[in-house]
Image: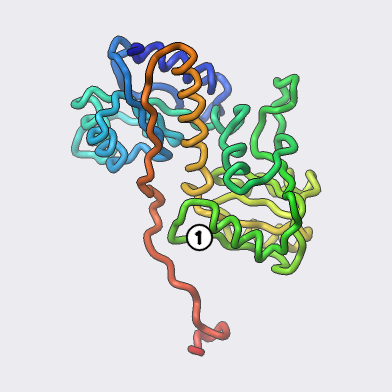
Amino acid sequence: MPRLSEVLSALDALWPPERAESWDAVGTVCGDPDDQVDRVLFAVDPVQEIADEAVRLGAQLVVTHHPLYLRGTTTVAAGTFKGRVVHTLIRHGIALHVAHTNADTADPGVSDALAGALDLRVVGPLVPDPTDLLGRRGLGRVCELDHPLPLREFTALAAARLPATAQGVRAAGDPDALVRTVAVSGGSGDGLFGQARAAGVDAFLTADLRHHPVSEAVQQSPLALLDAAHWATEWPWCTQAAAQLDEISDRNGWGLRTHVSRTVTDPWTAHAASTATDHSGAPN
Protein backbone atom coordinates (compact mmCIF):
# COMPACT_ATOMS: atom_id res chain seq x y z
CA MET A 1 0.00 0.00 0.00
CA PRO A 2 1.20 3.54 -0.72
CA ARG A 3 1.75 6.09 2.01
CA LEU A 4 -0.67 8.99 2.24
CA SER A 5 2.08 11.37 1.14
CA GLU A 6 2.46 9.44 -2.14
CA VAL A 7 -1.25 9.54 -2.87
CA LEU A 8 -1.43 13.24 -2.04
CA SER A 9 1.47 13.95 -4.40
CA ALA A 10 -0.48 12.19 -7.16
CA LEU A 11 -3.59 14.23 -6.40
CA ASP A 12 -1.61 17.47 -6.43
CA ALA A 13 -0.25 16.50 -9.85
CA LEU A 14 -3.81 16.10 -11.12
CA TRP A 15 -5.03 19.33 -9.52
CA PRO A 16 -2.05 21.56 -8.67
CA PRO A 17 -2.93 23.66 -5.61
CA GLU A 18 -1.20 26.70 -7.10
CA ARG A 19 -3.94 26.81 -9.76
CA ALA A 20 -6.63 27.38 -7.14
CA GLU A 21 -8.14 30.85 -6.79
CA SER A 22 -6.47 33.05 -4.18
CA TRP A 23 -9.58 32.99 -1.96
CA ASP A 24 -9.84 29.20 -2.04
CA ALA A 25 -8.80 26.66 0.61
CA VAL A 26 -7.52 23.52 -1.10
CA GLY A 27 -5.13 20.76 -0.13
CA THR A 28 -4.89 18.49 2.88
CA VAL A 29 -7.00 19.35 5.90
CA CYS A 30 -5.90 16.48 8.14
CA GLY A 31 -3.98 13.22 7.89
CA ASP A 32 -0.61 11.69 8.78
CA PRO A 33 1.60 11.61 5.66
CA ASP A 34 3.22 8.36 6.85
CA ASP A 35 -0.09 6.47 7.15
CA GLN A 36 -0.82 3.81 4.55
CA VAL A 37 -3.81 4.10 2.24
CA ASP A 38 -5.79 1.40 0.48
CA ARG A 39 -9.32 2.86 0.29
CA VAL A 40 -10.26 6.33 -0.92
CA LEU A 41 -13.73 7.89 -0.83
CA PHE A 42 -14.67 10.73 -3.21
CA ALA A 43 -17.52 13.12 -2.40
CA VAL A 44 -18.65 16.68 -3.05
CA ASP A 45 -19.13 17.92 0.52
CA PRO A 46 -17.00 17.26 3.64
CA VAL A 47 -20.03 16.92 5.91
CA GLN A 48 -20.68 14.54 8.79
CA GLU A 49 -22.59 12.06 6.63
CA ILE A 50 -19.53 11.66 4.42
CA ALA A 51 -17.18 11.29 7.39
CA ASP A 52 -19.45 8.58 8.82
CA GLU A 53 -19.58 6.86 5.42
CA ALA A 54 -15.78 6.84 5.28
CA VAL A 55 -15.66 5.22 8.72
CA ARG A 56 -18.11 2.49 7.67
CA LEU A 57 -16.17 1.92 4.47
CA GLY A 58 -12.84 1.66 6.23
CA ALA A 59 -11.33 4.38 4.05
CA GLN A 60 -8.08 6.08 5.02
CA LEU A 61 -8.61 9.09 2.75
CA VAL A 62 -11.58 11.25 1.78
CA VAL A 63 -11.25 13.54 -1.23
CA THR A 64 -13.92 16.25 -1.51
CA HIS A 65 -14.56 19.03 -3.96
CA HIS A 66 -15.76 21.57 -1.44
CA PRO A 67 -13.45 22.85 1.30
CA LEU A 68 -14.22 22.22 4.95
CA TYR A 69 -12.84 25.56 6.15
CA LEU A 70 -13.18 27.94 3.22
CA ARG A 71 -13.02 31.09 5.35
CA GLY A 72 -10.66 29.84 8.02
CA THR A 73 -11.39 29.08 11.65
CA THR A 74 -10.06 29.54 15.16
CA THR A 75 -11.35 26.22 16.50
CA VAL A 76 -11.84 22.59 15.58
CA ALA A 77 -13.78 21.87 18.76
CA ALA A 78 -16.05 18.85 18.40
CA GLY A 79 -18.95 20.98 19.64
CA THR A 80 -19.04 22.66 16.20
CA PHE A 81 -20.30 20.65 13.24
CA LYS A 82 -17.10 21.16 11.25
CA GLY A 83 -14.99 20.34 14.28
CA ARG A 84 -16.97 17.15 14.73
CA VAL A 85 -16.07 16.17 11.16
CA VAL A 86 -12.38 16.73 11.92
CA HIS A 87 -12.57 14.75 15.17
CA THR A 88 -14.37 11.86 13.45
CA LEU A 89 -11.77 11.69 10.71
CA ILE A 90 -8.71 11.94 12.96
CA ARG A 91 -10.14 9.49 15.52
CA HIS A 92 -10.45 6.86 12.76
CA GLY A 93 -7.19 7.63 10.99
CA ILE A 94 -8.84 9.18 7.94
CA ALA A 95 -7.24 12.00 5.99
CA LEU A 96 -9.20 14.74 4.19
CA HIS A 97 -7.98 16.35 0.98
CA VAL A 98 -9.76 19.11 -1.00
CA ALA A 99 -9.60 19.88 -4.73
CA HIS A 100 -11.88 22.84 -5.47
CA THR A 101 -11.17 25.61 -7.98
CA ASN A 102 -7.98 23.82 -8.99
CA ALA A 103 -10.23 20.93 -10.09
CA ASP A 104 -12.71 23.32 -11.76
CA THR A 105 -10.14 24.51 -14.29
CA ALA A 106 -8.19 21.27 -14.72
CA ASP A 107 -8.02 19.19 -17.90
CA PRO A 108 -10.16 17.20 -17.41
CA GLY A 109 -12.02 19.17 -14.79
CA VAL A 110 -15.39 19.50 -13.10
CA SER A 111 -17.14 20.85 -16.19
CA ASP A 112 -15.77 18.05 -18.39
CA ALA A 113 -17.44 15.57 -16.06
CA LEU A 114 -20.67 17.59 -16.18
CA ALA A 115 -20.58 17.63 -19.98
CA GLY A 116 -19.91 13.90 -20.02
CA ALA A 117 -22.92 13.21 -17.82
CA LEU A 118 -25.08 14.98 -20.41
CA ASP A 119 -23.38 13.31 -23.42
CA LEU A 120 -22.20 16.67 -24.69
CA ARG A 121 -19.20 16.99 -26.98
CA VAL A 122 -16.65 19.39 -25.48
CA VAL A 123 -15.25 21.97 -27.89
CA GLY A 124 -13.08 23.93 -25.46
CA PRO A 125 -13.05 25.94 -22.21
CA LEU A 126 -15.57 28.71 -21.66
CA VAL A 127 -12.96 30.86 -19.91
CA PRO A 128 -9.54 29.67 -21.10
CA ASP A 129 -6.58 29.55 -18.75
CA PRO A 130 -4.08 32.00 -20.29
CA THR A 131 -1.17 29.94 -18.94
CA ASP A 132 -2.27 26.81 -20.84
CA LEU A 133 -0.53 26.78 -24.20
CA LEU A 134 -2.71 23.88 -25.39
CA GLY A 135 -5.88 25.85 -24.69
CA ARG A 136 -7.63 23.00 -22.86
CA ARG A 137 -7.68 24.19 -19.26
CA GLY A 138 -10.03 26.81 -17.94
CA LEU A 139 -13.35 27.47 -16.27
CA GLY A 140 -16.47 25.93 -17.78
CA ARG A 141 -16.76 24.19 -21.14
CA VAL A 142 -18.33 25.02 -24.49
CA CYS A 143 -20.11 21.98 -25.89
CA GLU A 144 -22.19 20.71 -28.79
CA LEU A 145 -25.18 18.37 -28.87
CA ASP A 146 -25.13 15.48 -31.32
CA HIS A 147 -28.72 16.35 -32.23
CA PRO A 148 -30.48 19.69 -31.57
CA LEU A 149 -33.22 19.61 -28.95
CA PRO A 150 -35.89 22.11 -27.93
CA LEU A 151 -35.01 23.79 -24.66
CA ARG A 152 -37.79 21.98 -22.81
CA GLU A 153 -36.41 18.59 -23.96
CA PHE A 154 -32.83 19.50 -23.16
CA THR A 155 -33.97 20.58 -19.70
CA ALA A 156 -35.69 17.22 -19.22
CA LEU A 157 -32.56 15.44 -20.45
CA ALA A 158 -30.41 17.30 -17.90
CA ALA A 159 -32.84 16.43 -15.12
CA ALA A 160 -32.74 12.77 -16.12
CA ARG A 161 -28.96 12.53 -16.46
CA LEU A 162 -27.88 14.44 -13.36
CA PRO A 163 -28.32 13.00 -9.86
CA ALA A 164 -31.84 13.45 -8.54
CA THR A 165 -32.35 16.41 -6.22
CA ALA A 166 -35.36 18.18 -4.76
CA GLN A 167 -34.69 21.15 -7.04
CA GLY A 168 -34.38 19.30 -10.31
CA VAL A 169 -33.51 21.54 -13.27
CA ARG A 170 -35.31 24.74 -14.26
CA ALA A 171 -34.86 26.81 -17.40
CA ALA A 172 -35.26 30.42 -18.50
CA GLY A 173 -35.92 31.12 -22.16
CA ASP A 174 -38.22 30.04 -24.98
CA PRO A 175 -39.07 26.38 -24.23
CA ASP A 176 -39.39 25.67 -27.96
CA ALA A 177 -36.08 27.27 -28.99
CA LEU A 178 -33.62 24.76 -30.44
CA VAL A 179 -30.46 24.08 -28.46
CA ARG A 180 -27.47 23.09 -30.57
CA THR A 181 -24.60 24.44 -28.46
CA VAL A 182 -24.31 24.64 -24.68
CA ALA A 183 -21.89 26.12 -22.18
CA VAL A 184 -21.66 24.28 -18.87
CA SER A 185 -20.03 25.24 -15.60
CA GLY A 186 -20.29 23.08 -12.51
CA GLY A 187 -21.23 25.00 -9.36
CA SER A 188 -22.22 28.66 -9.12
CA GLY A 189 -22.01 30.23 -12.57
CA ASP A 190 -24.12 33.39 -12.77
CA GLY A 191 -20.93 35.41 -13.06
CA LEU A 192 -20.27 33.83 -16.45
CA PHE A 193 -23.30 35.02 -18.40
CA GLY A 194 -21.18 37.46 -20.40
CA GLN A 195 -18.71 34.75 -21.38
CA ALA A 196 -21.53 32.41 -22.39
CA ARG A 197 -23.06 35.12 -24.59
CA ALA A 198 -19.65 35.85 -26.11
CA ALA A 199 -19.21 32.15 -26.89
CA GLY A 200 -22.36 32.32 -29.02
CA VAL A 201 -23.97 29.25 -27.44
CA ASP A 202 -27.71 28.65 -27.37
CA ALA A 203 -27.86 27.73 -23.68
CA PHE A 204 -25.84 27.86 -20.49
CA LEU A 205 -26.24 25.20 -17.78
CA THR A 206 -24.90 25.91 -14.31
CA ALA A 207 -26.18 26.26 -10.71
CA ASP A 208 -27.22 28.74 -8.02
CA LEU A 209 -28.88 31.17 -10.42
CA ARG A 210 -30.52 34.23 -8.83
CA HIS A 211 -33.60 36.18 -9.90
CA HIS A 212 -32.07 39.54 -10.83
CA PRO A 213 -29.07 38.29 -12.83
CA VAL A 214 -31.30 35.84 -14.73
CA SER A 215 -34.01 38.44 -15.34
CA GLU A 216 -31.45 40.86 -16.75
CA ALA A 217 -29.69 38.17 -18.78
CA VAL A 218 -32.80 36.98 -20.62
CA GLN A 219 -33.66 40.60 -21.46
CA GLN A 220 -30.24 41.15 -23.02
CA SER A 221 -30.06 38.14 -25.33
CA PRO A 222 -31.84 34.94 -26.40
CA LEU A 223 -29.35 32.86 -24.40
CA ALA A 224 -31.31 30.20 -22.50
CA LEU A 225 -30.29 29.52 -18.92
CA LEU A 226 -30.58 26.23 -17.07
CA ASP A 227 -30.30 26.11 -13.29
CA ALA A 228 -29.50 22.75 -11.69
CA ALA A 229 -28.66 21.95 -8.08
CA HIS A 230 -25.11 22.94 -7.15
CA TRP A 231 -24.33 19.48 -5.75
CA ALA A 232 -25.73 17.72 -8.81
CA THR A 233 -23.57 19.68 -11.26
CA GLU A 234 -20.40 18.80 -9.37
CA TRP A 235 -21.10 15.20 -8.36
CA PRO A 236 -20.08 13.73 -11.78
CA TRP A 237 -16.54 14.97 -11.06
CA CYS A 238 -16.27 12.45 -8.23
CA THR A 239 -16.57 9.53 -10.65
CA GLN A 240 -14.12 11.15 -13.06
CA ALA A 241 -11.63 11.88 -10.26
CA ALA A 242 -11.87 8.34 -8.90
CA ALA A 243 -11.14 6.97 -12.37
CA GLN A 244 -8.08 9.24 -12.64
CA LEU A 245 -6.73 7.96 -9.33
CA ASP A 246 -7.50 4.36 -10.37
CA GLU A 247 -5.30 4.85 -13.42
CA ILE A 248 -2.44 6.19 -11.30
CA SER A 249 -2.86 3.35 -8.83
CA ASP A 250 -2.72 0.73 -11.58
CA ARG A 251 0.34 2.34 -13.12
CA ASN A 252 2.17 2.33 -9.79
CA GLY A 253 0.91 -1.03 -8.58
CA TRP A 254 -0.69 0.51 -5.50
CA GLY A 255 -3.86 -1.57 -5.50
CA LEU A 256 -6.02 1.30 -4.24
CA ARG A 257 -9.76 0.77 -3.99
CA THR A 258 -11.66 3.93 -4.84
CA HIS A 259 -15.28 4.61 -3.98
CA VAL A 260 -17.69 7.37 -4.99
CA SER A 261 -20.22 8.42 -2.38
CA ARG A 262 -23.84 8.18 -3.49
CA THR A 263 -24.96 10.06 -0.40
CA VAL A 264 -26.99 13.09 -1.48
CA THR A 265 -25.54 16.05 0.41
CA ASP A 266 -27.52 18.70 -1.47
CA PRO A 267 -29.06 20.77 1.36
CA TRP A 268 -32.50 21.09 -0.27
CA THR A 269 -34.77 18.21 0.70
CA ALA A 270 -38.25 18.99 -0.67
CA HIS A 271 -39.87 20.74 -3.62
CA ALA A 272 -43.50 21.53 -4.44
CA ALA A 273 -44.52 22.62 -7.93
CA SER A 274 -46.67 25.73 -8.14
CA THR A 275 -50.39 25.11 -8.66
CA ALA A 276 -51.77 28.66 -8.77
CA THR A 277 -52.98 29.92 -12.14
CA ASP A 278 -52.19 33.61 -11.60
CA HIS A 279 -50.20 35.94 -9.39
CA SER A 280 -53.08 36.25 -6.93
CA GLY A 281 -52.50 32.73 -5.71
CA ALA A 282 -55.99 31.62 -6.68
CA PRO A 283 -56.14 27.81 -6.98
CA ASN A 284 -56.88 25.99 -10.22
Identity, as a three-letter code, of the amino acid under mark 1? Gly
The image shows residue 20, relative to residue 253, as above or below, that is below
Find numbered disc 1 in the image and state the secondary structure of the residue it sits on. Answer: loop
Q: Quadrant of residue 116?
A: top right
The quadrant in which the N terminus is found is: top left
Q: Is residue 100 left or right of residue 149?
A: left
- Residue occupying image coordinates x 51% and y 30%: 23
Residue 143 drawn at (x, y percent): 72, 44
Q: Label 1: which residue?
A: 168
The image shows residue 248, relative to residue 108, as above or below, that is above
The residue lying toward the viewer, choosing from 261 and 9, is 261
Residue 46 drawn at (x, y percent): 35, 37
- Residue occupying image coordinates x 39% and y 22%: 28
The residue lying toward the viewer, choosing from 31 and 194, is 31
Q: How is the image coloured?
A: rainbow
- Residue occupying image coordinates x 54% and y 30%: 103
The residue lying toward the viewer, choosing from 129 and 14, is 14
User: Local crowd at mark 1 within 10 Å, few (<14), some, or many (≥20)?
Assistant: some
